[in-house]
Image (cartoon, helix red, strand yellow):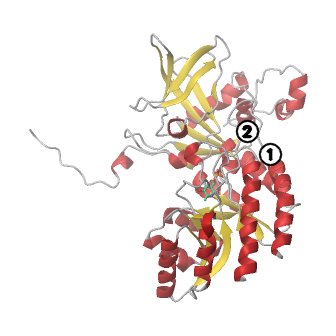
Amino acid sequence: MPLLRLSLVLLLLSPALCAQVAKPTLHEATLHEALLAAHADRAGDPGVATAFRHLAKTYGTPLYIYDQAHIRGQVDALHAAFAPRFSKLRILYAIKANTNPVVISLLKAKGLGAEVVSRGEIETALRVGYAGPEIMFTSSSKNPGEIQRAIELGAVLNVDSLDELGQVQAEARRQKKQARISFRINPGVDPHTIHQINTGIAESKFGLHLQDGIAFKAYEKAKGMPEIRIEGAHCHIGSQITETDGYVLTARKMLGLVKDLKEKLNIKLAFLDLGGGLGIPYEDGQTLMSPEDLAKALEPVWKEGVAAAGYEPTLWLEPGRFFVGGSGYLLTRVNTVKQTPLKTFVNVDAGFNTLMRPAMYKAYHRVRVIGKTKDPQLVDIAGDVCETGDILAEARMLPRAEAGDLVVILDAGAYGFSMASEYNARPMPAEVMVDGNKARVIRRRGTYPELFRNTERATPTKH
Ligand SMILES: Cc1ncc(COP(=O)(O)O)c(C=O)c1O
């Protein structure tokens, strides 16, 4: 791409400054600046539009775009908040949020471990260079092949039931190895998030409940198994959590377990994993806990808990969304605009096959129309999938868009591509990584022949 020169980036980067002075129009922007400008509701500016049009023309639509600087900045922010307060700290990346190997490599290069939920994610982690022992394998149940592979590699298996503990023991015995385990604990805490991503409440399918001593008894049982090496305790109470309270209560309960295990069973854990779940702002003006807020809130509870237990396990955290969510942009093109008696639909060339979250969770994503500022209209952004529920954004006041215009959906970096499918026989979108003013394809667009890649060649039938 011809170098689109930087201008006025300081104004974009400084909200305080922006609030005081009127924002001049951006006539030029690097790709990175254009992405930031879309967040700052400047997608109508000519320089921003040029950058997005360039991306659409070069790589096609629908297109996932990730901003490398954002991902790195998020890791730094989490580290800066926690490292000074927790001397024994390990941060992992929950790779399910975005499984692109380049994204994972970026996080690995920042020193993060890998938290995975399937054999496929184990293989992905290995492919980007993780060693088996650096991998934590969590899943509410695991098939025999997954258990076998995890033990062979020396990964930590996060055991979710007594049934699974027996299976891990049997496989470890077969391999004549010791399996490294932690237990996923259900602490019975409601972090007040969307129901489908609320995982730590009593009725959830995840983990061994703290309630009725169930988790404690699991440790007691595992302690008597020579094939099992107990390394830690784990919990993950949900996703897109915006307040500190749920974490604080969870930490208190989990540290209570740490103390009990030491006092009553003489089990000392190497780590206590408080999971991921840190929320990101999906709406303009949304305020939510910062990593600093969370670290500050956890610090006294942690200190008190480890003092009571008489030793300090390493604190593990394993966010996904927090690192990658805000880095992602889904760029789409308007196919048609349709007025019905009730609504105006802006029909775009992406759907819930591309970005599942709005249809699955009623999740809110900000939408910007590229290069347009005038004549705001109340519209629904509708996908191109043949399903009534395929609405990407509902009832938004947006500048008037017409066929051929570009629309960008913000904060699509987590659970975007990783949940995408070829439903309606649409090939997978491409993914590009932006670094300053450079973009590179990190996953090429799917093709039509790929839609048939695993099928038998059908012979045309005659009637
Ligand atoms: C066990 C576990 N850890 C971590 C995560 C990451 O969650 P988030 O992306 O909200 O940080 C998930 C997400 O579902 C999870 O199930």
The percent coordinates of residue 217 (x first, y second) are 60, 75
From this view, report whether residue 149 is shown above or below residue 246. below
Q: Is mark 2 within 8 Å of ligand 1?
A: no
Please name whichever residue, 342 or 184, is drawn nearer the observer in this view of the structure. Answer: 184
> What percent of the width, then of the height, locates residue 352?
48, 37
Q: Secondary structure at mark 2?
A: helix
Dividing the picture into quarters, in which one does residue 421 lie? top left
Query: In this rendering, is residue 185 above or below 422?
Result: below
Quadrant of the rendered image containing residue 310? bottom right
Q: Residues within 10 Å of mark 1 (few under 14, many from 20)?
A: some
> Going 64% across and 49% down the picture, which residue do you hit?
239
Residue 53 placed where, x, y %?
61, 29
Q: Is mark 1 within 8 Å of ligand 1?
A: no
Please indicate, yes or no, whether residue 99 appears anywhere in the rendered image: no
Residue at 52%, 89% in the rendered image: 176
The kind of residue on which mark 1 rests is: Ser
* Mark sitting on residue 32: 2
Which numbered circle lies on residue 290?
A: 1
Question: Which of the two labelled residues, at mark 1 and mark 2, occupies the earlier sequence position?
Answer: 2
Spot occupied by residue 118 in the image (x, y as percentages of width and height): 51, 63
Q: Quadrant of ligand 1?
A: bottom right
Q: Nearer the viewer, residue 215 or 316?
A: 215
Q: Quadrant of the N terminus?
A: top right
Residue type, numbered disc 2: His
Circle 2 Cα neighbour tier, 10 Å, few/some/many (<14 / 14–19 / ≥20): many
Identify the element where label 1 is drawn: loop
**Is 423 rendered above or below residue 344?**
below
Residue at x-position 79% and y-position 20% = 25
Which of the image's four quarters has the C terminus?
A: top left
Residue situated in front as seen by the camera: 275 or 303: 303
